[in-house]
Image (spheres, helix red, strand yellow):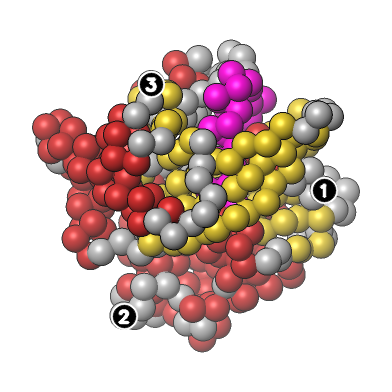
Amino acid sequence: MAEHYKALGIMSGSSLDGVDMALCEFVRNEGIWSFNMIKAITCPYSEEWKITLRSLPGKSHEEITKTDLEYGRFLGELVNEFLFDCYEKPELIASHGHTIFHEPEKGYTLQIGDGQTIATVTGITTINNFRSKDIELGGQGAPLVPIGDQLLFAGYDFCLNIGGIANISFESDGKRLAFDVCPANQLLNYLSLQLGAQFDDNGFFAGLGKLNTELFDLLNADPYYKRETPKSLSNQYVIDSFIPKIEKADLTVEDKLYTVVKHIAFQVNRAVSRFPAGKMLITGGGAHNGFLVKAIELETKHTIVIPETEIIDFKEAVIFALMGVLRLRNEVNCLASVTGARKDSSCGVIFRP
C-alpha cells in the first residue's frame, strides 16, 4: 500500500536571493518515491536581513545566538503566511536554515534558524540542523541533496545545481557521488553588483566581455581543484581565495564575468568528462542564465536538460522536505559515499511544537 506524506521544505542559499519554500506531497509505493509540488514560493530578503546575514560570521557568539532565534521566528512567520490560504497543511517542516559557518575540516557547521522557535511559532513539527551529525561522523556535512537526486531524479545521469556554489551528483560504480564543483553565482553576483545589478540577467553583461586567459588559468589553479572527493566549498573560502584573484585582475567587469562563466563551464566539464555521454539536469538560479548554460553546453559532450521553472527554483527545497520525511521515518537521508562520513546516517534534529 502506498504511503503518503505532506512536508514543507525551506531553503536559504548563499546568494541571499531569499527563502525558498516548497510544500510537497511524497508518495512511497513499493519502495519507489515520487512527489507532487503543491505550492512553492520565494520570499525575497529585506535589505536589513541581507546585511544581517552577510555580516553575521564576524559577530560575537551572543549576537549569533540572538540572531538564530530571531531568524527562527522570521521563518516561522513566513511559514504561517505561506500556509494561511493553503488548503493543504504539512505534517512537518524541514528547514535547512541559512549557513553562517561551514568548516567540516575543523569539525563544525552552523545553519541558523532555531528549530524549536519555528515549531512553536507554526505549531508544526520541525526538523533542522541536517549537517552536524554527518560532520560528527567524519563527513563533510555536504552536499546533502544527492539523496533526493537518487530517490526522485534517478532518470538523469548527472544532477548539477548552480547556486552560489555549483554542486553535482551522479552514480559511479553503484554508489552515489557528489561534491561542490566550483563557485558560481556567488562570484557572478559579486561582479554584477559592481555594475549596479543584483545579478547578471541571462548573462547579458558576461556576453559583452571576452576571455582573459591569465585570470582563467589563475582561477583553475586554485588548490581546491587538486583536492580529492569528497570535498565541499564554503562561502568563506570563496571570499578568501577566489574573490582576491578576481579583484587583482586589471580587467573590465564584463571581461571578469565572461572569464568566470568560462571557468564554471570548464570545471563542470572537468567533473564529468570521464563518463560516457548522458543527460545532465541543471537546476538552481544559474539555470536561468542562458549564457552560462550555453557555455556549459559548448564545453561538454553531455545533453543538457533544463526542467520547468518550479523544479529549477525549488528542487533543493523539495529535497529538504524529503529529507525531513526520511528523518521522521528514521531512514538514511545522508550518504557516506557523498560526504566521506564513516557511515550513512539519518540526519536532522526533531523539534515538537
Residue at x-position 61% and y-position 76% = 291
Residue 286 appears at what percent x and percent y? 56, 64
Write the start and end of the magenta stretch as one range: 315-339
Q: Looking at the image, which is closer to me, 211 or 121?
A: 121
Which one is earlier in the sequence, the residue at label 2 or at label 1? Answer: 1
CA distance separating discs 3 and 2: 38 Å
Q: In which quarter of the image is the C terminus?
A: top left
Return the mark for residue 116: none
- Does the segment drawn in magenta span residue 235? no
Residue at x-position 47% and y-position 26% = 348
> Can residue 57 be seen here?
no
Could you tell me what secondary structure mostly forms the magenta stretch? Answer: helix
Q: Do the residues labelled 2 and 1 touch (CB within 8 Å)?
A: no
Q: Looking at the image, which is closer to me, 4 or 44?
A: 4
Return the mark for residue 196: 2
Q: Is residue 198 left or right of residue 146?
A: left
Q: Do the residues labelled 3 and 2 touch (CB within 8 Å)?
A: no
Type of the residue with mark 1: Gly
The residue wearing badge 1 is 155
The total number of labels drawn is: 3
> Can residue 69 be seen here?
yes
Q: Does 271 appear above or below 186?
A: above
Residue at x-position 36% and y-position 36% = 123
